[in-house]
Amino acid sequence: MRVIMLVAGVLLTGCSSTPYTPQPDDPEFAPVYGESEPVSVRPTGAIFQPEQVNGIYSDIKAHKVGDIITIQLAESTSASKKANTQSGKDNSLNIEPAMLGGLPVTLGKYNLSGSLGQNSAFKGQAKADQSNSLQGNISVSVAKVLPNGNLLVRG
């Protein structure tokens, strides 16, 4: 019996564990990027460098680590919902005249019969619209240039 209790205790201990909560900048959850090839730059002292990605007549674009770029945020969402509901109900109840010995029972000149009716209706409509937008600018700097030319930015 002791052996069974010991084995059960060991098995149940293996089932209990504390959940891991990732922390900011945790290397376990950092993305993995391919390494870029080193660029050899030979200092010549001239303004024009033949190895430059952007030529003298091209647009100036961020392409090196440390370059500052502006990211423009433009997002918009919209949602719409519409519902129509209709329901109705009719009830009626008829009470036949009371009979006693095959003859209708009366109270004075009135017989003991009656009727009851009910009629109800419901008609409803609902409409909901929602829209959101986000616009802005964020300045960031290039942290890494990936081998395919994409930029990893931080800011």
Image: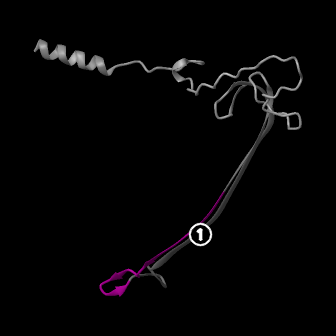
Q: Residue at x 55, y 26 (%)?
A: 32
| CA neighbours of label 1 inside 10 A, class few (<14), some (14 to 19), many (20+) | few
Mark 1 element type: strand
Q: Residue at x 59, y 69 (%)?
A: 121
For the C terminus, the image quarter is: top right
Where residue 62 appears, as percent x and y from the top left, is 79, 30
Residue at the left extreme?
A: 1
Q: Residue at x 87, y 17 (%)?
A: 45
**Residue nearest the observer in this picture, 87 or 130:** 130
Where residue 15 appears, as percent x and y from the top left, is 31, 22
Range of magenta residues: 81-104
**Residue nearest the observer in this picture, 87 or 99:** 87
Give the residue number, with chain letter if any, for mark 1.
Answer: 121
Above or below, 80 against 60 in this view is: below
Is residue 88 found inside the magenta-colored segment of the image? yes
Main SS of residues in magenta? strand
Is residue 132 found inside the magenta-colored segment of the image? no
Count the numbered circles shown.
1
Side of 29 where 107 appears, left or right: left
Residue at the bottom extreme?
A: 103
Side of 121 where 72 appears, left or right: right
Quarter of the image where one finds residue 68 = top right
Where residue 86 appears, as percent x and y from the top left, is 59, 68
Q: Residue at x 74, y 23 (%)?
A: 65
Q: Amino acid at mark 1?
A: Ala
Above or below, 54 against 114 in this view is: above
